[in-house]
Amino acid sequence: MERDGHLESIWKSEVKHYGQENISPIPNFDVVIVGAGITGVTSALMLQKKGFKCILVEAVNMGFGSTGDTTAHLNNFFETPYYQVINDFGLDSAKLLARAAREANDIIKDNINIYQIYCDYSIRNGYLFALNESQDKVLQKIIGGNHQVGIETIKSHVNPFGIPSVRVVEIPNQAQFHPLKYLRIILKEFVHSGGVFLENCTVTTVAENDGDLVTTTSKGNILSRYLIYATNTPPDSNILHVSNTPYRRYIMALKLKNGNYPEALGYDLSEPYHSYRFHNINGIDYLIAGGEDNKPENTDSASVSFKRLENYLRQHFEIEEIAYRWTTQLFEPAGGLPFIGKLPGSRKNVYYSTGYNGDVMIFGTLAAKILSEMISTGNSKYEELFSS
């Protein structure tokens, strides 16, 4: 929603952030986690529960950036389809990716149940639809790849969003939730478990001193054994910067004249594609639609991209009001899969994750599992799949 010239996410209109004041002096910690998005907060809780003394440092506030700006689809399939993973990495790797997707979804469900998180979580069927014959060729490849890795994909005779399509398939048992309602309780549980959270705290440098890491921040120095960059991209010059392409996605929350809000998740196969879902915020129904991704060299002004998205949506929906609109910055990995593990060219105890594409919630949760396992046990069964 455009308020005083600023774009505000629909999620941020409802949830207050949760943080602590400055702590002085700052004691030693086992792990410093930089960034309080889905990856950082989940990693912090997992490691704290494993007995590590953790501090979570955030430059702005909880959920700032991609986590707060996501459309919050929870899928077992990704923007890089399984047939492409099979072609590039082999069938075993694709099956492992499907297993990872199931595990990340289960982590979110388990957290919701264990901590009794009221975050509008609901099961939804996902629908992929081809709008023309060219897209249909891609969709048939997606169907084949899904079947090879055990992702149930069923022919459907109806597109629940009413968009004319040459082929529609249903992928059951996907989900959606309110990302900041979820994250706020995870963060509170981390603090209640003895963790420390500092917001409005920027990290300037990380240096090594006698085998330990010294993290210099705007609120003082922190000594630790390990550090995780959960910041969308790691800082400074790094090979990962040329392995990730940044782009912006444009998102709108719409009120529809006919009041028809399908309880489904939808995706066309346009290039770039568009996604759809319904959410109720403060008793009001919205259709949340995203698309019109731009890479930096092709980026128009935000107003031009939003207008293009609006024009496209008006072809298929009777729009009463565009209630909210916002953008998010995402990173597309060169190989199609995220990079998660030890930071290349850095000290042995510095970890990172990046390159989630648009699959922020699932890959962010999965990264937390992988990084917490690598720190606590020295390895993860998914480590090689996501190694840079």
Image (tube, rainbow, N blue to C red):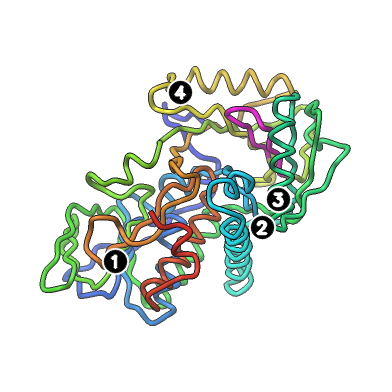
- The kind of residue tagged 4 is Ala
Q: Given this view, does label 2 or label 1 mark the residue nearer the observer?
A: 1
Question: Depth check: 356 or 25 in front?
Answer: 356
Mark 2 residue element: loop
Query: Which is more N-terminal, label 2 or label 3?
Result: 2
Q: Nearer the viewer, mark 3 or mark 2?
A: 3
**As drawn, is 144 to the left or to the right of 295?**
right
Q: Amino acid at mark 3?
A: Asn
Q: Earlier in the sequence, mark 2 or mark 1?
A: 1
Q: What secondary structure is marked by label 1?
A: strand
Which residue is nearer to you in this view: 334 or 319?
334
Q: Which residue is mark 2?
A: 121
Q: Which residue is identified by label 4?
A: 302
Label 2 crowd (10 A; few <14 / some 14-19 / many >=20): some
Q: Earlier in the sequence, mark 2 or mark 4?
A: 2
Q: Earlier in the sequence, mark 3 or mark 1?
A: 1
- Magenta region includes residue 94: no
Can residue 118 be spotted in the picture? Answer: no
**Residue 303 point in image, percent of width and height:** 48, 19
Badge 3 is on which residue?
A: 146
The residue to which callout 1 is attached is 32
Query: Tag 3, which secondary structure?
Result: helix
Seen in the picture, residue 315 relative to 68 is either above or below; the reply is above
